[in-house]
Amino acid sequence: MYKNFLKIITFLSILVSPFLFTSAYAKTKVGFVYLTTPGDHGWTYAHELGKQMVKKEFGNDVEISIVENVPEGPDATRVIRELAKQGNQIIFTTSFGYMEPTLKVAKEFPNVKFEHMTGYKRTKNVATGNIRFYEGRYVQGVVAGLMTKTNKIGYIGAYPISEVIMGINAFAQGLRSVNKKATISVIWANTWYDPVKEADAAKVHIAEGADILAQHTDSPAMLQIAEKNGALGFGQSTDMGAFAPKAQLFASVNNWGPYYIKKIKQLKDGKWNTGGGPDHWAGNTWGGLSTNMLTLSNFSNMPTDVAKKAQAAHDEIKSGKLKIFAGPLKTNDGKEIIGAGKTLDDGALWGMNYYLEGVTGKVPK
Amino acid sequence: MIEFTPRKIQSSFWTILSPIISITITILIGSLIFKILSYPVIESLYQVFVSPFSRPDRIADIFVKACPLIIIGLGLIFCFKANIWNIGAEGQFILGALCAGSFALLFPETKTYTLLFSMFLIGFVGGAIWASIPAILKVRLNVNEILVSLMLVYVAMLFIDFVVRGPLRDPMSFGFPLSKVYPDGAIISKVDFPFIGFLGQFHYGIFIILILCPFIWFFINKTLPGFQIKIFGSSTRASEFAGFNKNKITFYVLLVSGGLSGVAGVIEVSANMGRLQPEVSFGYGFTAIIVAFLGRLNPYGVVIAGIIIATAKLGADNAQMVLGIPKVVTGIFEGMLLFFLLAGETIQKYKISIRKDN
């Protein structure tokens, strides 16, 4: 009796197992956590587009769950944990403030993979992803330098963190490559997304004589102000041309799709890992123009020769010929960072807490 | 024209039934909305109202979410019973969290129990001080407490924003506006249930409701000050004839309400965040107003109401995860619930008749 019972079980499990395995392989459950709604037309919208690319690439092989409007507090922990409990195998948490919640939940679910944007802490099952936004900003700087008449560039930053500062410095490098007289002044909005504050900052810049505006915040508000006042500017995260057809020169477009697809493929093939070492550096994805994680929207509202120079800068960064942070580099108060012939490495970029030449003022402490 | 005549006797039957009816109507209209937007109705309702109860850790998380709502709501009972409209619980919550947090960060060496105890005390005082501003203005100059308490919410938000950017910013936070992580002694730990382990985020702070709720019930219903508050709220003139001190009542209800909001802030930050950040409250102070009314200003009712609102919030997340229903749709539930509840209250308090004009 007992023997037969064992036989039946063995038989049944052999019969069923191919289905179990194929179905587990075929359908990968993917979770996304959004900070706001795709209606922000900026940061979260860019992630939404990436998610749609995943859907297109894998079709019915993935099952996607999203949760939008998740504040960066206890709710994030709960939502991420819930996604893990519901059997999602890989979870993309798309805002810096989800760092601690992601790490907390990842500890409880060692078999679930987590991809956190844009943090710096990795573990065995937490990888990080980020875009080399600064590459697009160099091209913005080139265009700004050629287009400005007042030689004053207004820049709106979110927070004085290294990611934003390296963007400002890259912009300055681009600007000074074509125009040594122009300067950048920075206003800190102290928010990633607040159309009212962003619009106010834009107005201040214009009142102070800036004719080209750039932003490291997420809403189209700055461009709308530029449009009204006859100034020009650059879009952020997604193509914002529809909001400012006469003001947008081009937009740096975040293209998360290829990154998502790569990571989900790695998971399906059992190749997802974050490597060893204390900082699991292999788990860091930091892509830019060369991997198509950053793209530029069409050049508009500029003469063809400017567009040509912008395109050339874009191509050279993409091919790796142009190094944005190549020496000699000097801070705006005259301190030398590196001499000629050297280039800042990625680690040095994340430690940036100074402005390069071309930027006015000081980094707030 | 429509005429409202106050009813002489309010049946306790309707007092209990009206929230139930409000919830029922909300669910019916909600189903209609799901139907119109072509989401599966039963499945949607299941996700919003039932799925949060479907697993022990989910139930635990309901209490985590409800905890600040209930504690603030319990405090608001005092104000609303006395007809004092404290709309600024959100600000008092923030101040409580900020004061207690600053203390924890400035004196990290204090021993565990002393540290937590002082944080509760300081949190209470912080919230109470914030609420005392509208209280003093109301008592001395008869300034409208609704406006003052509401506007102080924004002051509190900007103040904590300033503090985590400036004085208390963690130098290792890569420029992000975050304070240092609290010392271990200042953290309210999660409950390690025997044989089960941790359930969601369930933490020891939630147990404070078990003490607060009966205590407040007793205070309101069985003591003289509680009686004074009730009389003061239903008829100021009568309470004046009885010789009750109007200013004293106004002052104390605001203080207690603010203090409890502050305590809620202490618990929320110390149990769930472990550090100060620019946003520590996500509208708890405002949602708690709904909770207080949904609970009919009864302490036990507030506990149930807090659980209902928390359930709907968690359910909204589940509904989006499983069915892809946007949160704005589920957010309508909360608004409808308050609307029907207030409508129900009006019907219950007044006899409504249509009179022909001559």
Image: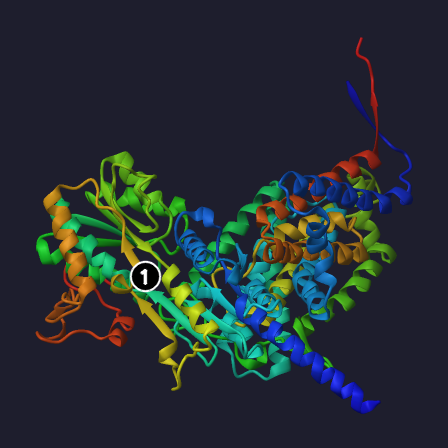
**Farthest top residue in view:** B358
User: Given the image, what chain letter belongs to the residue carrying mark 1?
Assistant: A
Q: What residue occupies the far bottom of the structure in this picture? A: A3
Q: Is residue A146 left or right of residue B176?
A: left
User: Where residue B122 appears, x then y in whole percent?
Assistant: 60, 68
Identify which residue is drawn at 90% across, 34% down: B8
Q: Is residue A241 above or below residue A93?
A: above
Left/right placement of residue A70 relative to residue B25 reads left
Q: Is residue B340 above or below residue A192?
A: above
Q: Is residue A311 visible?
A: yes
Quarter occupied by the N terminus of chain B: top right
Give the side of residue B178 with respect to residue B342, left or right. left
> Looking at the picture, how far across and down is residue A56, in whole percent?
44, 55
State whether residue A181 is above or below residue A22.
above
Which of B218 and A271 lies nearest the eye of the viewer? A271
Q: Label 1's element?
A: loop
The residue to which callout 1 is attached is A293
> Who's the residue at 81% across and 54% down the image?
B226
Residue B100 placement (x, y as % from top left): 56, 69
Quarter of the rendering containing residue A204: top left
